[in-house]
Amino acid sequence: MSQNVFDVAKERFFRYTEKLQLNQRYPGASMPEHLTEPDRSIETRISLKRDDGSVLVCRGYRVQFNDDRGPYKGGIRFHPAVSLNEVKALAFWMYMKTALLDIPFGGAKGGVAVDYPSLSLAEKERLTKRYATILVDVIGSERDIPAPDVNTSSQEMAWIMDAWRMIHGRYQRGIVTGKPVTMGGSVGRDTATGRGVVFCIEEAADVIGLDLTHSAAAVQGFGNVGSASARFLAELGVRVVAVSDVHGAVRNLQGLDVPELLRHTRAGGAVSEFPEGEACDRESIFAEDVDILVPAALENAITAENADSIKARLIAEGANGPTTIEGAHILRSKGKTVLPDILCNAGGVTVSYFEWVQNRQEFYWDEAKVDEELKRLMVRSCRQVFAEAQRHDCCLREAAYRIAISRVAEAAVGRGVQ
Ligand code: GLU
């Protein structure tokens, strides 16, 4: 039987932190256990009254993994594949991400196992508010701050904020991030993850000597992260030759017109129906003859089955956990540069942090300031990860884990582990 995603995430943690010798460094603190057991896991039934009067029963989750460095922070995903183990793994990676970017949060994640896109707008609102009502006493701007993730956006954040307001009778803007700008959201939050992915790609391109204006890219997934990554890559002069979504893929060797493709998908079209390209198989995205590959969909996309076919020199993990341990091993043996998820997709939570800061001050930044600060933090972390990898002759993922885990362990010991 295949291992669950959380067990695999822990295995990776133990492998990458072995050389940190946490037990020797912090005798008696049981640090590896402290860092791999979630603080609190909530699993709950959510009954949704459908528009036709029937009731749909779903499972909902929130895992608050670690708050040694600050309040729990992490997105909420609504997807049929959501499970307690998946949410634990995602929450685990969240606290590493906030530590790596050195922003003052811990890590959490939530989700509901539901075919969310098939619900009506009214059903979506009822489901989101029901979920928020269940969590109302465990979330808060100094407790646990949700944000968008797969299939959730500023609309869901507005509903969560409203559910909280209805119960507590007052506003708390910092309760969620990724809200609509009209309700205290930050400009630039919706495209922040994609922007961050591209800032990392620029840094890596410098290190490995890749000329971006003569490069081609393929992007797997055309949701929030994939579409923004494709857009910013194209703006830099990278030829985005192939893009995939849940239905299929599209290829144009001259380079896809990404703004046109975005208009097409926003109007409800699948990428494979885009007229200015050739429709192709969804799986073929991995084997495209490109320099850069951005996996920007779900976990376990790059595996032992397809890693060998990857031609890209640079793999930028826009998704969380897109590469399996075996997949990563193959990429490493072929000398590929892999920008690990906890670094590469951290732009979203970084601008979430800026949103939270703006909410605390009730003073709002313009987009130029958001992008400038995002670039500063992403570039700083990229350089730290590259330097750590060089210092210890290890891969970028191990380097990222070393930095993140050292910071969290220091904070845990500082406040006294109990
Ligand atoms: N869901 C995003 C992530 O996986 C963003 C989380 C946040 O902004 O809190 O990083």
Image: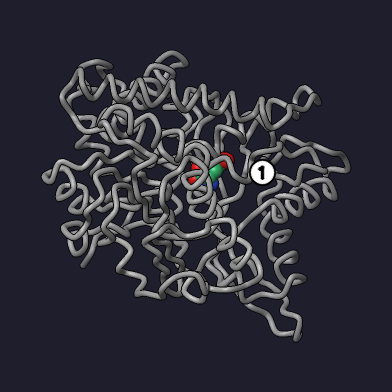
Where 80 falls versus 44 (above or below)? below
- Whether residue 358 is visible to the viewer of this picture, yes or no, is yes
- Whether residue 31 is visible to the viewer of this picture, yes or no, is no
Residue 194: x, y in percent? 51, 44
Residue 42: x, y in percent? 54, 52
Where 222 falls versus 107 (above or below)? below
Q: Which residue is mark 1?
A: 178
Question: Quadrant holding ligand 1?
Answer: top right
In the image, farthest residue toward the right = 169
Write the residue at 50% across / 70% down.
Answer: 276
Quadrant in which the C terminus is drawn: top left
Report which quarter residue 402 is drawn in. Answer: top left
In the image, farthest residue toward the top = 414
Where 122 falls versus 148 (above or below)? below
Write the residue at 56% across / 28% down.
Answer: 374
Residue 155: x, y in percent? 72, 55
Report which quarter residue 268 is drawn in. Answer: bottom right
Where 64 falls versus 416 (above or below)? below
